[in-house]
Image (cartoon, grey):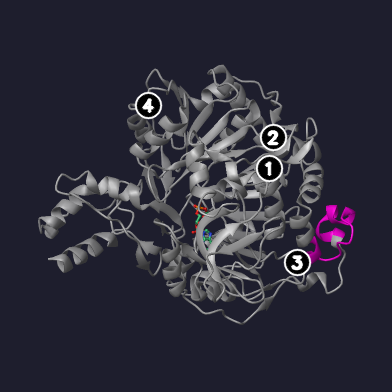
Amino acid sequence: MCSLWRGSLLTLTSSLNRRVFQCCRQFGRSYNIASCMPEAVAFQGVSDHSGLYKFSVNESDRFWGAVARQRLSWISPFHTVQNCDFSQGKIKWFEGGKLNVSVNCLDRHVHTCPERVALIWERDEPGTEVKITYRQLLELTCRLGNLLKRQGVRRGDCVTIYMPPCPLAVASMLACARIGAAHNVVFAGFSSEALADRIRDAQSSTVITVNQGVRGGKVVDLKRTVDQAVQNCPSVQQVLVAMRTENTVAMTDRDVPLEEEMMKEDVVCEPVAMDSEDVLFLLYTSGSTGKPKGLVHTQAGYLLYTSLTHRYVFNYHDGDVFGCVADIGWITGHSYIVYGALCNGGTTVLFESTPVYPNPGRYWEMVERLEINQFYGAPTAIRLLLKYGDEWVQNYNRSSLKTLGSVGEPINTEAWEWYHRVVGDGRCPVVDTWWQTETGGICIAPRPADPEAEIVPGMAMRPFYGIKPALLDTEGGGGGALCISQAWPGMARTIHNHHQRFTETYFQPYPGFFFTGDGAHRSKEGYYQIVGRLDDVINVSGHRLGTAELEDVVNQCPAVAESAAIGYSHDIKGEGECLPKTRSGKIMRRVLRKVVERNTDELGDLSTLDDPDSVHEVIRGHRRLR
Ligand code: 6R9
């Protein structure tokens, strides 16, 4: 591992760009710490942001205790702020406390502002968005919670959700939280095999899906994928099917028409009092070896951390429209589209489409139409869009924008500059947010709410409150393996059913530290730049793929004795992995066979390929091998 990061550091793309952007001058030079974080008034001696950061790491019990009491609604108070021991991989926060996450995300806002819009469902077809108020979302959640109970789902069970971003997907997540079940959201682009693996590992008896998805003008048969998956999942007793399109799909005895059945349920569903450390959800992510890991996040700490980072990293204020274009199937969707945003009473966008549908102006047309204030997206999309030229951006009014966020992979200087200069008209801070499924929420970001904050293009900059990074195995020049030296409330608690793998992966490489798997660089000012993975995880378009998973698939070909998957640098996607895949993640073997047989004139229908160019790359690669 150590030699690997050295290699990565050598490829550090840009030397630190010294141009620095000051942001958030609107607070002026003198400011009141209470206006930034009300709890801070009670922290003795804290008068500015750097003091507040120091307090958050040096007095972390007092910091997190105060913030948790202030920001979450508790059914009963916690008695211990934290009880953590990295050597055993033991992470516990707010023990003794009881709360319900759905009450924090819904009921308390329904009391104060029932008609505020909670969700804007930006459907695939522009201009057909649907708005759901907090009152409506609570009703949907309660009906669904009651339906799940009627179907036999109990506290502690795990429900698998295979749905594109839509209000019923969010209501399903919150319904689980309301009745004390955990959820396992699987990205609705994954294949039936990947879905089946995750259902089996989570031992779900219930799967929630839609008849069909709609994305980029194309209809995707999601229910059919679920049907294939559950054939190999004996634990599944029922599949709840919502209707995203009007097309009927074959229903079996196991299938339950979701809308029809939930309308029979009551709009009141008693929230269960959950312990702080009960499981909120599992989310599977790729590791460098073996099967995907079901990372476990729990109730209170996760909710607190996502809401605090949502508020301060993006400078989110009441009434703002938060536009995160990730899918709910990734941690970014969980933490910032759903939990962080709703815990803060925010209005949050659910984006169903693609950056180029119906044209490359889609994001910015949406920003104008929905008056989005914070836009949060991935560098891969920014790199793609900048190639289409500035006009697609400039055609639309983006004056509502206040903060631009980036996540998922390093953002190169060209993309950063374009995002800042063209999309944000040079006036919106760009926050490059570094974090992982494992960290639950953003750990390193510029913090625009800090009036003193400066931002260096392409740098994630500074640790968030409570985060104490450490670079280990340093070799001069300020680079090293990025670790975090003390616990924070948002971190994952274990890997579902594999606690030993959890400790081995994250706590044994550097005893006493949480190891992130990334390499980073620290400037003399103390700002962080993330270099990328040190292990065999490949990052394609911001999505994590394990080399072992790719090799597993390749090795299934009878002619293949051994294989090795590697990432190579790709202009738009960060890294490429060279295989022609359908949008649902299936590798098109028939295409590979034709290439190997040198029948490239008879490749057949390539319309379901996610990236038709990948075939040409394979052809070119094969020619070189010959
Ligand atoms: C949130 C998310 C995590 C991995 C992480 C790192 C890469 C994420 C980044 C970044 C550089 C950033 N990563 N954000 N690299 N700069 N701002 O993406 O979670 O899917 O678990 O991926 O993504 O390599 O370790 P996840």
Callout 4 secondary element: loop
Pointer 2 local density, CA inside 10 Å: few below 14, some 14–19, many at least 20: many
Are the residues tagged 1 and 3 within 8 Å (C-beta)? no
In this image, 512 relative to 99: left or right? left
| Circle number at residue 276 | 2
Residue under label 1: 301
Closer to the camera in the image, 386 or 336? 336
- From the Cβ of disc 3, is ligand 1 less than 8 Å away? no
Label 1 amino acid? Gly
Q: What stretch is highlighted in magenta?
A: 34-52
**Residue 114, relative to residue 511: is it above or below?**
above
Are the residues tagged 1 and 4 within 8 Å (C-beta)? no
Q: Nearer the viewer, mark 1 or mark 3?
A: 1
| Circle number at residue 450 | 3
**Residue 19, relative to residue 509: is it above or below?**
below
**Residue 507, relative to residue 152: is it above or below?**
below
Position of residue 479 measured from the top left corner of the image (x, y, whole percent): 54, 70
| Magenta segment, prevailing SS (helix, strand or loop) | helix
- Cα distance in 3D space between marks 1 and 4: 32 Å
- Cα distance in 3D space between marks 1 and 3: 23 Å
